Image: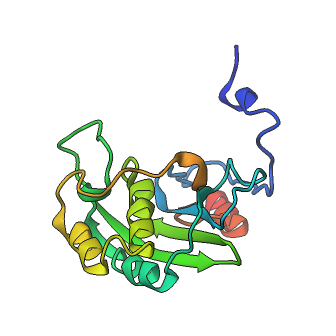
Amino acid sequence: METAISRFQGALSVVKKFPMATGRGILCSPVSKSRVYRYSLLTRKTRSPLLRNTTYWIPRPLDIERMREAARLLVGEHDFAAFAGVLDDPKASTRRTLYRAEMKVGCELMEFEVEGNAFLPQQIRRTVGELVEVGLDRVPVGEFERLVECGRPHEAGPALPPQGLCLERVNYQDFPPKVERDLERVRE
């Protein structure tokens, strides 16, 4: 029988292992505290064959300052229904909290990095799509702010392709574990 790990053989690698205490009194919760995603954009006249699977190519320069101004509006608790794709449960809450939303710029590579408590389907790809529209001066920052505040489903433009999106990190409460403290608690 094929296991979940065997399907990814060769695609996963262990970077660091943490010894875990076992026994009574230790609660391991699968609930994350936050998630960090990155969406990468390549802004130059020609495509990159090396980056084509990990970035979205835009053949024009973007106004990074306008994009940063718009990205700052995302931080905090908002109803992100405007940026969501189709939900499995249409009655589910679309309120999410973003702790940070930043535009990082290299020479030709631009990255949108966002950290939040949870995300809706296509939320990041639609958000970056609107930020690109702001950067191309097609959407005013005030219109972007209206989208953040409106809470009406599917108001934002189409989602960008998935190639630029990457889950960077999932943060858990009390992780990595403080093994010595946890082992002492088990011995008591």
In the image: residue 51, left or right of residue 72: right
Q: Name the quadrant containing residue 169.
A: bottom right
Foreground residue among 60 and 54: 60
Residue 13: x %, y % from top left? 80, 46
User: Could you tell me which residue is drawn at 73 percent across and 54 percent down?
Assistant: 51
Q: Is residue 151 above or below residue 76?
A: above
In the image: residue 99, left or right of residue 18: left
Q: Is residue 116 above or below residue 93?
A: below
Foreground residue among 143 and 95: 143
User: Could you tell me which residue is drawn at 78 percent across and 55 percent down?
Assistant: 17
Q: Name the quadrant containing residue 70.
A: bottom left
Does any portion of residue 102 appear in the rendered image? yes
Residue 30: x %, y % from top left? 51, 49
Residue 143: x %, y % from top left? 24, 73
> How many numbered marks have been drawn onto this rendered protein structure?
0
Quadrant, the N terminus:
top right
Q: Name the quadrant containing residue 66.
A: bottom left
User: Could you tell me which residue is drawn at 39 percent across and 75 percent down?
Assistant: 137
Colour mode of the rendering: rainbow
User: Could you tell me which residue is drawn at 54 percent across and 47 percent down?
Assistant: 162
In the image: residue 22, left or right of residue 118: right
Check the image and name the residue furthest to the top: 1
Check the image and name the residue furthest to the front: 45
